[in-house]
Image (cartoon, helix red, strand yellow):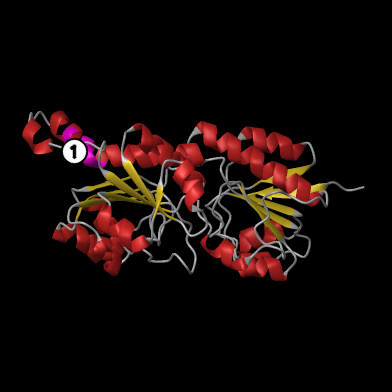
Amino acid sequence: MNRMAILVTDKIGKSGLDLLRQHADVQEAYGLKGDALKAAIANADGLMVRSGTQVTADILQASTRLKVVARAGSGVDNVDVPEATRRGVLVVNAPGGNAVSAAELTIALLMACIRKVPQANASLKAGEWKRESFKGMEIGGKTVGLVGLGAVGKVVARILNGFCARVLAYDPFITDEQADRMGVAKVDLNLLLRQSDVVSVHVPLNDATRNLIGASAFSTMKNGVVLLNAARGGVVDEAALLEALKSGKVSAAGLDVFAQEPVVAGSIAAALIACDNVVATPHLGALTHDAQEKVAVQAAEQMVLALQGKQPQYAVNQPAKNEASAAVAVI
């Protein structure tokens, strides 16, 4: 009996690869696109990706054997889930495995913004001593609004509670009681935007969240608000954010994700990165040794279960799944 064949097109943790090899023949082929990816996937039963591979409709159509696509991470915006569903291909992911790493980067961006760490570091390395230029603010006692209270948002809330911040959250899929147990006040989005000193985004990118934080949202926010996005590019309207930074409505922004990645010269994202009051990183949220091993193992376990005809825990396109819930589920 022939063993299953799994194609891995983005680098994943060794523990996940080892697990896959126990159950199938594994081909590692990184960076494939277009015809090269179509040729490689033609004989694959399973496809393992991270965020680098775009699993579009035409890619899915290139294989008649494909049974499952596994995303070693939480978001599946790089996978055409409706097309996969039409073709009978199961899509699974690994939610929560990178939550701590993504949450910790969010806090790192927050602290870098409010204490002006990158600017002070650059000044000091240039031989300057301009302490008064880098006067910051404390997060203790401030109000932080979390747009989304999923796996990452929950960890961020827990850390902020340790800083003695007041934490608000907008998330239609948690109850007041759940929020209260996390030390968070559940509010509607407008109230969160009006009252928060810091607004942090923790939702996936989909039709319900695209440009959720745009010109209207910025006009509702406090003057001098700090904005953080280590979730998904496209949730924040980059053009509107650029204007808000220039006007002073947003005093600082910490950004790990962008609408187009990698960022290209001449784009709005490039203009954002060039702003003195922006701290930016190249999508590092889940990029820790710890998180990569966790999500690799979790995604591999899901793929193995699916290929064995068993029900994986984290299937995102099961017929029984409520589409409305899937559309705005938080990360």
Q: Position of residue 319 (x, y in %)?
A: 72, 65
Q: Position of residue 313 (x, y in %)?
A: 70, 48
Task: Tell me the amino acid under the disc marked 1.
Answer: Met
Classify residue 144 as left or right of residue 95: left
Q: Answer whether residue 248 is visible to the viewer in this image.
A: yes
- What residue appears at the point 52 percent right and 52 percent down from the top-left corner? 52
- What residue appears at the point 38 percent right and 66 percent down from the top-left corner? 211
Q: Answer whether residue 266 is visible to the viewer in this image.
A: no
The quadrant holding residue 139 is: top left
Q: Nearer the viewer, residue 36 or 213?
A: 213
- Circle 1 sits on which residue? 137
Secondary structure of the residue carrying tag 1 is: loop
Q: Nearer the viewer, residue 112 or 19?
A: 112
Question: Is 313 situated above or below 57?
Answer: above
Instruction: Check residue 318 for magenta coloring.
Output: no
Q: Nearer the viewer, residue 316 or 270?
A: 316
Classify residue 177 as left or right of residue 165: right
Classify residue 137 as left or right of residue 330: left
- Counting every numbered tag in the picture gives 1
What secondary structure do most residues of the magenta stretch adopt?
A: helix
Classify residue 319 as left or right of residue 276: right
- What residue appears at the point 61 percent right and 46 percent down from the top-left corner? 94
Residue interval drawn in magenta: 113-120
Q: Residue furthest right?
A: 1
Q: Position of residue 298 (x, y in %)?
A: 65, 41
